[in-house]
Amino acid sequence: MNMPIIELKSVGKSFRSADGKARSVLEEVNFTLNDGEIVALLGKSGSGKSTMLRIMAGLIPADSGEVLYRQLPLYGPADGISMVFQSFALFPWLTVQKNVELGLEAKGVPLKERAQRAEAAIEMIGLSGFEGALPRELSGGMRQRVGIARALVMEPEVLLMDEAFSALDVLTGERLREDILELWESGKIPTRAILVVSHNIEEAAMMADRILVFASDPGRVRDELPVTLSRPRQVESAEVRELIDKTYGLMTVGGARAGRVIGKEIKLQLGDRLPEAEILSMEGILELLAGEPFNGRADLPMLADESEIDDRELLDVSSALTLLGFVQLDHGDIILNPLGSQYVQASNPERQAIFGQQLLEHVPLISYIHHGLVQDPSGDLHEDMFLNLLRFTLGEMDAKAALRIAIEWGRYGDLFEYIFSTGVLHLPKDEVVEEA
């Protein structure tokens, strides 16, 4: 039996919202990363996955619970744990060589040794010949390779990867993922365990020995899917496609978005996050779902391939369409409802009317904004009023994102208008006259 390397026991973490109140980001997180395994962690943006990784790396403390590294309490950064970030996090004024050497320099490794180790890491990750280049001279994929080399040069026992491939194009991300797996399988790196945080379900299916699904508000491990397939894996094999399908099913059962799931319906509360779904993407999926070859019902992985949008966007779009009553989600399938069919066949003005009505019925934030505008004598209200409301339950970035989505949806549904230069929301002119 493989021994645990890192253990989280009932870990909790809160941050202060803009109003000064504590907002729980993680609650009762229980997780074990074992020797000899790759684990993928999937979940929505803002669910606390990155916070969990930073706690595991010793970069921030947990507020409650225990964090153990090799069965000893972890109180700060550990020598055996390295982290790769989504944003590359390179110093633009330093060469590739100097960026890779940074961690070794901080540990006081002698100049000659750190130069040798950095050169070996750079060669291992496929960047030989670029030691003297600056980050601005490199492609995105090459910059991420520098970030990975900087982590590997520390010879970590545990490698934590926070959306490490998400900023790259598909082909570059796949190539880099394959290189990491080759290093892992060949034993060229001393790393004993890898935790990959991702939104990409295919990536998780191709890499992981276990797939975890993270819930939101607060973040916690909701589901676990063991993976028994050997590596390397073929993405088109029946076994991998079945695994991807199962993972989609887990992601869409109660965990695809914030709010409460009742039966096959999604119910929002006033201060919940909204799925980050664009109007055009929602309409595109509805039209695709209504036509051949799906005829109203589609397997989500197949729909992802056909629509050529990534997993994160497809899950958000599917959640939004479920919320508005246009579709149902059922164990990894998406099914067009009668209202969805009606919407696809409607003219643009009819679509806007249907959309607006569904917003008023199913999105409390938009209904609250519209009601406030109707009740105000001027028919004008500043966005800060609604931002302050959202800050009670969401962090600053999530509050702004929720209001941005609400404004975009509400404008399309012809429920209100928005002046970007002043931040003022107001009723459409014909509605002001009608209410007057």
Image (cartoon, rainbow, N blue to C red):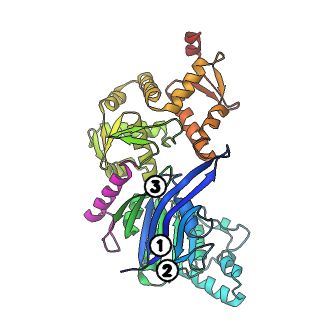
Quadrant including the C terminus: top right
Which residue corresponds to mark 2?
Answer: 191
Q: Is residue 262 visible?
A: yes
From the top left corner, tell me how far across and down residue 81 is, in percent: 56, 75
Q: Taking 343 as reference, is 201 above or below it?
A: below
Q: Are marks 3 and 2 in contact (CB under 8 Å)?
A: no
Residue span colored magenta:
226-254
- Looking at this view, is 385 or 288 the one in front? 385
Dot 3 lies on which element?
loop
User: Is the residue marked by circle 3 packed among few (<14), some (14-19), or many (20+) residues within 10 Å?
Assistant: many
**Secondary structure category for the residue under label 1:** strand
Rounded to the nearest angstrom, the CA distance separating label 1 from label 3 is 17 Å
Q: Which class describes the residues within 10 Å of circle 1: few (<14), some (14-19), or many (20+)?
A: many
Q: Is residue 187 left or right of residue 422?
A: left
Work out whether 59 lies above or below 167. below
Residue, x 45% and y 72% (percent of image)? Answer: 33
Q: Is residue 162 left or right of residue 345?
A: right
Residue 359: x percent and y percent?
46, 29
Q: Secondary structure at mark 2?
A: loop
Q: Residues within 10 Å of mark 2 (few under 14, many from 20)?
A: many
In the rendered image of this protein, does residue 269 appear above or below residue 33? above
Instruction: Name the residue tied to disc 3.
Output: 43
Q: Quadrant of residue 84?
A: bottom right
Residue 135 pos. (x, y %): 66, 68
- The residue under the point 67% across, 43% down is 19
Three-letter amino acid code at disc 1?
Ile
Question: In the rendered image, which residue does mark 1 sit on?
Answer: 194
Which image quarter is the N terminus in? bottom left
